[in-house]
Image (cartoon, rainbow, N blue to C red):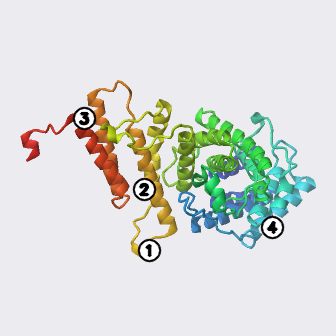
Amino acid sequence: MSAAKLAALEKDIHLHRCMGQWPTLRDLVAKYKRKYAPGGSVLESLVLGECALNLVVEAEEAASVFPYDAGPANDFVDPVWNLDRALQDAGAQLEVAAAKASAGAASGAAWSLAQQVAILQARVDLLSGRPESAVKRIWVLPTESPSEQLGAYAKVNIIMAWTVKGARWSIAILRTPSERGTNMLADSVPVTPPLALAHERLNEIPAALECLERAVAAATAYQARVLSGMSTSVITRNDDDQGLRWTEAALYAHSMISLRAGQTEAATASLIQYLKYISPTPLTYVPTRKVAVLRGYLHSLLSTLNPFPRPLNDVPEGVISNRLPPTVHKELRTHLPLLEKLVTTLLPFPRGEDVTVTDRGRYDRVQEVYDWWVLCETYGPPEEAPGDLIERHYRLIETLYRGTRHTFHSMRLLRYLSHVFRSLLSIFGDNMSANEKK
């Protein structure tokens, strides 16, 4: 009975790690120590160090603003996180866990506690500005184990390990104007996310991408298992799902670094996976990174068109028309509603001198979305019925009126509106009844 209770408590501890319930975990570990390991254990020190680490990171994220969505006028640099002092408690607990593990307290099973300690120590090193030390800690770890041997949180650790090994820096490098001018997607590639990864910090982009490709493979396999119902997880919306958090981190880092390195095909594959797994999350979940991903994906999608379609470029001919490939049209209609919600939610109403560079960048993003709506809604099939043509015009008018509320009556949007009305008149003429004209 005692062994069964111990196994149940250990399972509960790992479940709460999956859920990101760090304050509750401390109580569970205290219970574990009191009943089963009064002299201390690797699991106790590991979990206490992990709790301390994640609570510091959560507090820093809440206090920091990362406007990944606001370029291209300004390439924002991540705030410098000087967490060396804040992470002293986490580092001390993990050192104790590592010492006990090396003394033989941890089991030799796949993805042992000792390996998890090394991964967390690497994260502490990265957040404390020591990427070289982080790489040394985790480079020798076996990162592939048969999935049937692993619990849910051990699988999360695989994603975490490869993502940390993928190595992005904690202080993003500001690109020069000349670099921005030579990169077609420069305005859609924000700085890297707030959790530093070591190889990219060390400017080893090929090594970073190789590791992140493994992280993406592990993440997509994990999420496929969750979506198929094979996972027995009881994680709710109120929990900080660590599997989802590290899936997002891996896919975001891989897609953005690939775009920066000019590897568009690899980036697009990760962008599609990101949208598949992260788009359904609440609007408030990493909103600026969602904007960056959506923009990166739509820019790469539209960049394949030659010649590039311009909104309303056929207006002088009298009818709004656009030869947009059906696949591109479908993707625009799929993703623009979410992108519109995100960019309009993130944009506050600036007042005169209170307008910041972030506000101006976000204002540009909002106008860009309505440019894309015009591209999307001016598309019509060759044999379009008159009723469908009318509906498409009115749908675009409604969208543009909605846009004027978010763009402070932008002249660009007012021009679009006038052209749409002109297109309607050129097709049907002024055939309203006398009563409608009153």
The disc, 4 or 1, on the residue closer to the chain's N-terminal end is 4
Residue found at the far right of this picture: 103
Mark 2 secondary-structure assignment? helix
Residue at numbered disc 4:
92
Disc 1 or disc 3, which is closer to the eye? 3
Q: Residue at x 75, y 41 (%)?
A: 214
Q: Measured from the top left, where is residue 49 in percent x and y?
A: 75, 62
Task: Residue at 65%, 59% (x, y): give it.
Answer: 178
Q: How many labels does the image show?
A: 4
Quadrant where the N terminus lies?
A: top right
Q: What element carries label 3?
A: helix
Type of amino acid at the residue the image marks with label 1: Asp
> For the residue carrying disc 4, how many other residues have a C-alpha within 10 Å: few (<14), some (14-19), or many (20+)?
some
Q: Which amino acid does label 4 sit on?
A: Ala
Tell me the CA gap for discs 4 and 1. Answer: 45 Å
Residue assigned mark 1: 354
Mark 4 or 3, closer to the camera: 3
Ranked by sequence position, the earlier of labels 3 and 2 is: 2
Kind of residue at disc 3 = Ile
Q: Residues within 10 Å of mark 1 (few under 14, many from 20)?
A: few
